């Protein structure tokens, strides 16, 4: 909304300025409007559009009028770029105002200076003619300001420790296999006494004796090699599944195997690809390319057989290994519990691997203890995640230079979270451009939240509200306030008991015209000297005091 600051109550149509000096004397006939009416600081700048309206017959045809916008605050003044206008007989390059008057809009811009939140924008005008000048009798009031609500944004940055990959229960397998002759489903006796079966029995017995391991079931899986008609191979695979099931009953006597499930896969193209990939067969890349190009089993077989130079090797070294059935006993290993990890950290930390160390650090709230655990992970495993997490703790403690030094030790520069932490350091250091560059390179959730904060600091309030929606970040409610969505902001702040939340609720109440509610919220601020001092000068509360 625009505010009229000077308006004439006389009939402007009959004004006649025969003397240049009369322009200063009749300054009250000039109309000035400002948009916004209350100035606002956005991204450390104050921008506004000022419209100056000169009445008919006001402007002397040989005069020049210079208007200097001035921000007055806290006993200081900052002058902006002047607006200069000229009468229709002046031969300079200023904006011309004729006898019919004019309405001219100018853009003003000031760099924010602390103290401007309680300020006044005025125009200081001087009429000039040849070597003479006449100053307007008083400054022209343009606007009040400036609103600095966006500066409530939390600039500490959002960050989170890198996650561990510790598994409370680790799946394991004990496996054996029996091989069949081509086009046969009969289990040969030598297959039941093979080294594979012996190792399987020993492995299962070891599991049975281990209190940390539990057998959860066994899979019998039968296959056929991918040579010959597919239909015949599928039938052969089914027959092998049946014979393998009978053979397993002999193998598993006196063994715990859990529930047994039998499956027939058919042609084992997956096993074929694995064996070829791990072999030294000439032209193996060509074979693998055929597998990737064709999905039809018959086409695959035909194309591979056409490679006469290598098919003999496949038939001798690869295909016999695929005429098989596998016995796979599934085991669950119970990893160290939280209590066991805590005890091991104290008594035998050296036996813990990287993942166990990273998990152990999450089990204590003592930051010094966390740092000791991360130091062990760095020393023993050169753990980049431990370095990142150490940097997070240092940031929590406000030790930015130490955090930066720790991040420089990270060897994997693409690790998730690194760019985000570097952005946080830049944000805290006041380098917003550098911070934004780092946050835009980050793929993690914290980096996206920080981009919302950057939108607030750069004046992109709608984008900030969208990015921060549902994140629970400290700046989410502020983004809604700045975007004009007071209902959502109120909902988020309803149950918050921090003094900052009370301050933001006071802003919402003041904007809604609820003076008593605003004052009640401000009364809750008892410990924050910064917020108390801010409230004294905050333009948000100008109408409730």
Image (cartoon, rainbow, N blue to C red):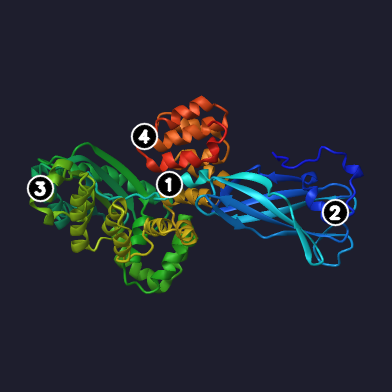
Residue ID at (46%, 33%): 492
> Mark 2 vs mark 1: which is more N-terminal?
2
Q: Quadrant of the N terminus?
A: top right
Question: Circle 3: is it few (<14), some (14-19), or many (20+) Cα within 10 Å?
Answer: few
The image's mark for residue 59 is: 2
Residue topped by disc 4:
526
Q: Closer to the observer: label 2 or label 1?
A: 2
> Mark 3 vs mark 2: which is more N-terminal?
2
Question: Circle 1: is it few (<14), some (14-19), or many (20+) Cα within 10 Å?
Answer: some
Residue topped by disc 3:
206
Residue ID at (55%, 40%): 539
Q: In the rendered structure, are the residues bearing label 3 and label 4 in contact, judged by CB atoms less than 8 Å apart?
A: no
> Mark 3 vs mark 4: which is more N-terminal?
3
Image location of residue 137, percent across then percent down: 72, 50
Question: Circle 2: is it few (<14), some (14-19), or many (20+) Cα within 10 Å?
Answer: many
> Disc 4 on helix, strand or loop?
loop
Q: Closer to the observer: label 1 or label 4?
A: 4
Closer to us: 286 or 374: 374
From the viewer's perspective, is 430 left or right of 260?
right
């Amino acid at each position: 909304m625009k505010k009229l600051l000077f308006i004439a109550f006389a009939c402007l149509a009959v004004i006649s300025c025969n003397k240049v000096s009369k322009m200063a004397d009749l300054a009250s006939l000039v109309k000035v409007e400002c948009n916004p009416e209350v100035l606002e600081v956005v991204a450390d700048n104050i921008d506004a559009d000022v419209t100056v309206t000169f009445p008919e017959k006001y402007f002397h045809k040989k005069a020049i009028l210079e208007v200097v916008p001035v921000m007055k605050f806290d006993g200081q003044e900052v002058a902006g770029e002047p607006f200069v206008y000229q009468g229709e007989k002046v031969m300079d390059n200023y904006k011309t105002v004729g006898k019919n008057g004019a309405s001219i809009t100018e853009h003003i811009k000031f760099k924010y200076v602390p103290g401007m939140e309680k300020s006044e924008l005025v125009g200081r005008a001087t009429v000039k003619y040849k070597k003479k000048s006449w100053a307007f009798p008083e400054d022209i009031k343009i606007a009040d300001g400036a609103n600095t609500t966006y500066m409530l944004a939390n600039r500490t940055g959002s960050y989170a420790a890198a996650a561990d990959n510790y598994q409370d229960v680790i799946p394991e397998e004990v496996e054996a296999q029996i091989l069949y002759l081509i086009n046969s489903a009969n289990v040969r006796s030598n297959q039941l006494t093979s080294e594979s079966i012996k190792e399987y029995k020993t492995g299962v017995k070891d599991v049975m004796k281990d209190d940390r391991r539990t057998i959860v079931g066994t899979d019998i899986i039968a296959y056929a090699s991918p040579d010959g008609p597919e239909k015949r191979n599928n039938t052969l695979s089914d027959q092998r599944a049946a014979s393998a099931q009978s053979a397993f009953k002999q193998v598993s006597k006196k063994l715990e195997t859990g529930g047994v499930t039998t499956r027939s896969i058919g042609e084992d193209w997956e096993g074929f690809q694995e064996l070829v990939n791990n072999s030294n067969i000439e032209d193996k890349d060509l074979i693998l390319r055929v597998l990737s190009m064709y999905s039809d089993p018959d086409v695959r077989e035909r194309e591979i057989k056409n490679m006469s130079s290598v098919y003999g090797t496949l038939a001798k070294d690869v295909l016999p290994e695929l005429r098989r059935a596998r016995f796979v006993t599934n085991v669950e290993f119970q990893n160290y519990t939280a209590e066991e990890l805590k005890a091991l950290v104290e008594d035998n930390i050296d036996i813990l691997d990287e993942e166990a160390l990273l998990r152990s650090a999450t089990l204590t709230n003592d930051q010094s203890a966390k740092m000791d655990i991360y130091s062990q992970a760095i020393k023993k495993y050169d753990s980049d995640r431990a370095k990142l997490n150490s940097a997070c703790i240092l940031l929590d403690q406000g030790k930015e230079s130490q955090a930066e030094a720790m991040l420089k030790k990270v060897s994997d520069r693409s690790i998730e979270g690194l760019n985000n932490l570097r952005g946080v350091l830049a944000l805290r250091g006041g380098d917003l451009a550098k911070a934004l560059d780092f946050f835009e390179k980050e793929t993690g959730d914290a980096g996206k939240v920080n981009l919302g904060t950057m939108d607030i600091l750069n004046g992109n309030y709608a984008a900030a509200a969208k990015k921060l929606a549902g994140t629970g970040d400290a700046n989410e409610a502020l983004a809604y306030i700045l975007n004009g969505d007071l209902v959502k902001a109120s909902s988020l702040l309803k149950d918050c008991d921090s003094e900052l939340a009370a301050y933001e609720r006071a802003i919402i109440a003041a904007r809604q015209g609820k003076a008593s509610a605003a004052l009640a919220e401000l009364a809750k601020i008892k410990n924050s000297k910064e917020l108390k001092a801010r409230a004294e000068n905050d333009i948000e509360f100008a109408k409730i005091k």
